Image (spheres, rainbow, N blue to C red):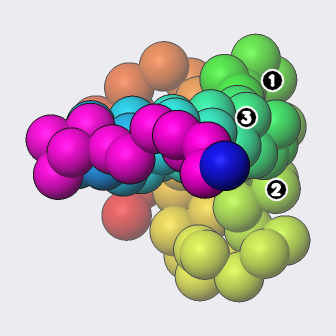
Amino acid sequence: MMGYYGDWAWGQWLAMSVTMLATWGLVAWLVVIAIRGWRPENRRDTADPQTILERRYAHGELTEAEYLHARAVLNHGSSQDVPS
């Protein structure tokens, strides 16, 4: 005797496929969000301005003249008081 295996209509296959894609998309999105959240450059820098300036100079983002000028501005409070 032959059994009934419950053939699915095309709408049910489509619903299953969309649900599977949405599930895997959600998993991928959560992984990306988790990885971006753990990267240190996304964290807020709470260092004082002098430390940030020294770090930027050490990484080569500033020339010596820019570094000295910015340091003088930080120490004196105004760029008008600093000789160029």
Q: Is disc 1 surrounded by few (<14), some (14 to 19) or many (20+) residues within 10 Å? A: few
Q: Evaluate whether residue 49 shows in this view.
A: no
- Residue 46, horizontal then vertical, whole percent: 76, 17
- Report how far apart the C-alphas of labels 3 and 1 lie in the structure: 24 Å
Q: Nearer the viewer, residue 22 or 61?
A: 22
Q: Amino acid at mark 2?
A: Arg
- Residue 59, horizontal then vertical, whole percent: 78, 75
Label 1 SS = loop
Q: Nearer the viewer, residue 15 or 58?
A: 15
The residue depicted at 73 percent of the width and 34 percent of the height is 34
- Report how far apart the C-alphas of labels 2 and 3 lie in the structure: 27 Å
> Which residue in the structure is indicated by mark 1?
47
Q: Which residues are magenta?
A: 2-12
Q: Amino acid at mark 1?
A: Ala
- Residue 53, horizontal then vertical, whole percent: 70, 48
Say whether residue 67 is left or right of residue 14.
right
> Which residue in the structure is indicated by mark 2?
55
Q: Amino acid at mark 3?
A: Ala
- Residue 63, horizontal then vertical, whole percent: 59, 82
Say whether residue 69 is left or right of residue 34.
left
Which disc, if any, is residue 34? 3
Disc number lying in front (3 or 1): 3
